[in-house]
Image (cartoon, rainbow, N blue to C red):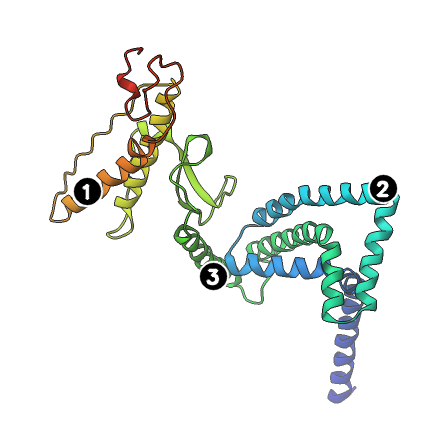
Amino acid sequence: MTVWSWLRLAVCLWLLRKAFRLARWLPLLAVAIAAWPVTIVAAAGYIAAWLRGWPPARLYRTAVGFLPFTALWLGLEWDRQGSWTGIGPAVAGAWGRGWSDRNVPGETRAFLLVSLAAIPAGLALAGLAWSWRNYAVNSGIGGWLASAPVTFDARQWKRQVRAATGRCAAPGSVPLLARGGRIPVGGTIRAIGHRWHPVFGVPYTACARHMVVVGATGSGKTNLMMRLWAGWFTAALAAAHAGRGRPPLLVVLDCKGGRDARVKADRTRRLLYAAGPGGWRSGPTRPGCPYGSCRRPTWPSCSTR
């Protein structure tokens, strides 16, 4: 056997292996093309999770959030068709019109008609694909180089930091006090061993324990402490108004001092007043007050207590 014949044999075997591998993906490609609305949503969700550094749980939760709209749509279709058996042909007809009307208005109309079923299914598929990608890279079975897991993790960390920073900068995305008496601290970059939430929060009762805030200069330690103080004061004042505790008392000692101490003290005073007593000025009277004038800022001094 000559060198040239050996090279031709090696190339033919390589092409044959690639052809068999490609043939395995052809059925999946055909299904993806046939179910193009679901494929579009899945591709968009996967790209969004990759660019924003979202965990797969974010895609799953978004898919679950669409299910009530899907259920409402199914209920309306059932009421219009008169039976559950007519929903399938209606969806198939809308999907078929997307193939017959091969133009932008026709395909857009077909996508909108099946969107309430395609969006949750596509997001669920995107979550599965993104979960598999994370597992494959972290376990070493994905990527071209041995350093792929390190590079992937570093890039995703940067994207997660960017997403969390944007979430904190968006007006109203991180409120002063969340439901259940939790104080939102800031956007979550990454959660390990815990359920992922877009915003990390701590219960206001945890502020009664010892706490240490460690960070470099300019990293936001003072703003974090102000947020914790204001959130705790608001939650504690609400609990006291509901009769679940005593009125809050907050004493702050600035042992650092410096020229900007008065500026920070004034910011803290205005924030606490707006979040605490100032925010309760226009509230209703205290339940059970016989005088009818026991407003929220002054109700602790009511003679009925």
Q: Which residue is mark 3?
A: 155
The foreground one among 243 and 187 is 243
Disc on res. 22: none
Q: Position of residue 300 (x, y in %)?
A: 29, 19
Quadrant assignment for the C terminus: top left
Tell me whether circle 2 and circle 1 mark residues in contact (CB < 8 Å): no
Question: Does 277 sit left or right of 40 as displayed?
Answer: left
Q: Which residue is mark 2?
A: 84
Q: Dot 3, how many residues are within 10 Å of its Cα: few (below 14), some (14-19), or many (20+)?
A: some
Q: Dot 2, how many residues are within 10 Å of its Cα: few (below 14), some (14-19), or many (20+)?
A: few
Disc on res. 266: 1
Rendered position, 249 above or below 95: above
Rendered position, 108 above or below 78: below
Local secondary structure at mark 2: helix
Q: Amino acid at mark 3?
A: Arg
The foreground one among 234 and 44 is 234
- Residue 141 visible: no
Question: Does 47 sit left or right of 219 as displayed?
Answer: right
Toward which corner of the image does residue 257 lie, by quadrant? top left
Q: Amino acid at mark 2?
A: Trp
- Residue 105 visible: yes
Question: Does 287 sit left or right of 85 as displayed?
Answer: left
